[in-house]
Every structure is written in structure tokens, then in C-alpha cells.
Image (cartoon, rainbow, N blue to C red):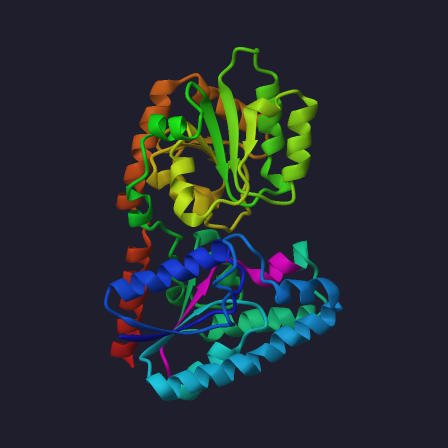
Amino acid sequence: MKILYHHRTRSKDGQYVHIEEMIDALREQGHEVIIVAPPSGESEAFGSDAGLVAWLKRHLPQWFYELMELAYSLVAYRRLDKAVKQHRPDCLYERYNLFLPAGIWLKRKHKLPMLLEVNAPIFEERARYDGLSLKRLARWSQGYAWRNADYVLPVTQVLADIVADYGVERERIVVIPNGINEKRFAQAPDTETAKAALGLQGKLVLGFTGFVRDWHGLDKVIDLIANDPPESSRYLMVVGDGPARAALEQQAKDLNISHRVNFTGIVGRDDVARYVAAFDIALQPAVVAYASPLKLFEYLALGKAIVGPAQPNLMEILMDGHNAVLFDPEHSHGLPQAISRLCSDADLRVKLGENARTTISEKYLTWRANARRAVSLFEQLRTDA
């Protein structure tokens, strides 16, 4: 099958991981994937932002930047149309973005079966966190894309409910969570070997990966460690970077526990597994209500005892006492109490870790399985046409 894959992402972050892994999985299954996207920053380090695009967003008037986003759809449409005429694809797979109706235009003109992958309700997300100037236009563009794709593929059922609220029929919504590349994590060392390689022998390692934000709650973990007796082995390792890092490092310094907290900074994708392998307890302390966090699947694949909030999107994957310890996110002491429970119960950590690993296979949480699901939907659309 020839699949035209369209996205508008330049930053090399979690979005980039999802895009690259899905494309690779489709190609491994023998499908030809033609990519139409902005010029990629292949030379940029993993974790970098979108370069010029990020600069424009910071310095242009908001309304003008949003009009530029919409105008880009004309450029994208011309590229897509050229790709169709050159390659004659069988179908279109698009990663949803705001102010981006180009894929729908192409689908209608060439009558291509279309899947629209949705990772977030970007209108609501940007209106809340970044602000939007052209709100009516933005909301229209989101609904237009969601209602006109053949199938919409949200990453959680919570997000599926938001999609349905825009008037998309339930039978055209198929939830496909994020996944894991098993090959990338297959050679990860065991916990003790990983600790030795990082100089963490004898430590009880609490670990977190990803972009560090204020609302993640890592300040509570630092406070927890600060209250430990001097002989405690509890240690926090944060694999990643972000706007909250400086404040958290200062907090650890002020509490005289800098020697028990380590921020690695951004780590290359191929190195993430050897860091996560050293975790005794993997932290997912907070997450937006509709997300399917990539770190969660890494934790599961490496058989880690997970601590996370008991909220619907995570509970689509996690079960308290089975493959995680879940806490009430409304309870101020929920996170530290859940961590303390796991720290004091080695048998529970082993049980949760074993069940975490099997969750991947039981729920088919791999990019390979996601690619198969997408292809199956394309085949169904082509049969029905």
C-alpha cells in the first residue's frame, strides 16, 4: 500500500518520536510511505524546538502568527497535490494540527481514504495555555478537520469524548494509544547493571523522564527526600529538561540534598532506556486529562513499578495494585504517600514491574500494532468505497 503521510511538526520532541516510529512501523510492514511535511531539522539535537517557527511565535503578534499558520495550508496543499500526482498514493494519514485544513481539501479533491491522528484537542490546549487570538477561526478549523476525516484516531478515550462533542460519529472514532518500539528497549540492562553504569549502586532510585514543568509535582518528591534520615538511600533522577528544572535544582540546594537529586538534561532517544532501566520506581506524577504520555509506555516496557494519578486517561492503561500504584490527584499528600508505600515494599515493586511488562503485549501497545490497526482501517475504507 502507498500511504501519503502528512504532518506540520518541526520540533524534535515527543511529537517527533510518534511520527518517526509510526512511519518506521508502516515501512517495516512493507508499505511505501511518502512524507509531506515542513523541512526537518535532521541536524538538530533531540529535544530542540522548532527553530525559526518558535522564534516567529514568540515575536509576531498572535493574530498575525495564526493567520500565517492558516496560510501555510495553501503551501501544504500544493505539496500534497504534487505528491499525489507524482506517487499516486492509496490513502492519506495525517497528524492533526490547528489551522491545517489542507489534508481535508486533498482528500475531497482526490477522494483519498483519510485517517486523522489526534494527540490533543489543540484548540482547547492553546486557548488555555498559550492564548489564541482568532478563537472562532481556530475552533472552526478543528471541527472541520475532525468532522471530515474518514476516521479520527484519538490517543485516549477521554480525547475521543472531546472529538465526539464536535459532532463526529462514534463509529468514525477509533482510539489508538501511543506505543513502544520493542527493539529500542530490548537490549536495556537490568536494574542493578544500569545503576552501576550510572554510579548509583545502593540507591533506591525514583525516576522521571521528559519535559519538566511546574505542575508535574516533582517539588513534592524533593520535599519527601529532604525529610528522610541521613542514611536513607532514596534518590531522585530526572531524565530530561524543562522550565521547572532551575527552580527544582534550587529547591534541592536549599534543602541540602543536591547530592541526592540528579537532572541529566536532555538525553538522546537511544540512551533513554539505559537511564530508565536504573529506576526502582518510575514517576508519572501529573498528566493532562486527555494525554497518552510516551514515558508511560517506556516505563511499562522496562518493567518498572509506576506511580501515577488515578485519572481516566491513565486508567485506560493502568490498574491500581496490578501494574501501578495510583493516587488521588486532588489529595495534596497523594503522590508522596504512594511513593513511600512502594519504597517500603520491595515485593510490591517486583509484582508491579512484572505486570507492567506484560501490559505491553496484553494490550498491544506497540508502534507495530498501531501501524497494523491503521492499515486495517485503510483496507476497510478501500473495500467500502
The count of marks equals 0
x 27%, y 66%: residue: 376
Residue 95 placement (x, y as % from top left)? 46, 66
Q: Can you say which quadrant of the picture contains the N terminus?
A: bottom left
Residue 67 placement (x, y as % from top left)? 67, 76
Looking at the image, residue 88 sits to the left or right of residue 252; the answer is: left
Q: Relative to 301, does residue 99 appear above or below in the rendering?
A: below
Residue 216 placement (x, y as % from top left)? 59, 39
x 38%, y 38%: residue: 274
Q: Relative to 378, does residue 358 appear above or below in the rendering?
A: above
x 52%, y 10%: residue: 231
x 37%, y 31%: residue: 194
Towards the viewer: 345 or 380: 345
Residue 342 placement (x, y as % from top left)? 44, 22
Residue found farthest to the right: 61
Towards the viewer: 255 or 267: 267
Residue 343 in which image quadrant = top left
Looking at the image, residue 305 sits to the left or right of residue 121; the answer is: left
Q: Can you say which quadrant of the picture contains the C terminus?
A: bottom left
Q: Relative to 324, does residue 155 appear above or below in the rendering?
A: below
Towards the viewer: 6 or 274: 274
User: Is residue 154 something one can see in this rendering?
Assistant: no
Q: Is residue 345 magenta?
A: no
User: Is residue 124 something one can see in this rendering?
Assistant: yes
Q: Relative to 346, does residue 28 appear above or below in the rendering?
A: below
Q: Is residue 124 magenta?
A: yes
Instruction: Specify start and end residues of the magenta stretch as a single range.
Output: 111-126
Towards the viewer: 224 or 40: 40
